[in-house]
Image: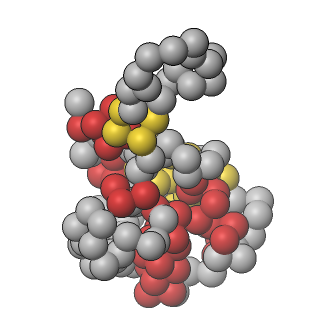
Amino acid sequence: MSSNGKSANDAVILGAARTPQGRILGALESLSAVQLGQVAVKAAVERSGIQPEHVHEVILGHVITAGAGQATPRQVWIGLNYPSNVGGLSVNKICGSGLKAVMLAAGGIRAGDGEVYVAGGMESMSNAPHLDANLRKGFKYGNVEMKDAILQDGLW
């Protein structure tokens, strides 16, 4: 502990950014969660003054991941042409996902696992698909029931 009461493992926020808040099928509907995440992450990294190569891990909350592909935090990072050796972790704690991502990053700093993390959340309800769990197995006859990924994976 230094004379100012701070330790080398204290977590501090160096930069922050967010996208505009939109509505489902509104002005941001053409942007995927990964694309929205890229806008916010790029701005936060630039505002922080930290070089991307100093980042240890990217931790992002992302709940409705159906159809978004694997490892969406890594997609965000790699899509920005930032160093590919940076790990990524996706958090699904429903509405608390972004905050939990920040808490995990702070815990990693306190534990000495890394010094610089990118943490936050991303979502695109407009791009959440409708799902049919039985389609893969096929069906002989009858109606097909679709489920909304927003309800299936996010709200219930």
On the image, the x and y values in percent for residue 26 come to 27, 73
Of residues 55 and 133, the one nearer the viewer is 133
Q: Position of residue 122 (x, y in %)?
A: 40, 60
* Residue 94 in the image: above or below residue 26: above
Q: Residue furthest front?
A: 141
> Residue 145 lies in what quarter of the image?
top left
Any part of residue 10 in sight: no
User: Quadrant of residue 30 in the image?
Assistant: bottom left
Q: Is residue 86 visible?
A: yes
In the picture, the quarter occupied by the N terminus is: bottom left
Which residue is drawn at the image coordinates 51% and 71% (left, top)?
35
Q: Is residue 79 left or right of residue 63?
A: right
* Point 77% across, 59% down: residue: 85
State the count of labels. 0
Query: Residue visible at 34% across and 39% down?
Result: 148
Which quadrant does the C terminus fall into?
Answer: top left
Residue placed most toward the observer, 139 or 98: 139
From what the image shows, is residue 130 above or below residue 139?
A: below
Q: How is the image coloured?
A: secondary structure
Q: Viewed as shown, does residue 22 lie left or right of 80? A: left
Relative to 43, say whether 58 is above or below. above
> Residue at image x 45%, y 35%?
131
Question: Residue 64, how many percent across, how many down?
Answer: 41, 45
In percent of width and height, residue 97 lies at: 34, 46
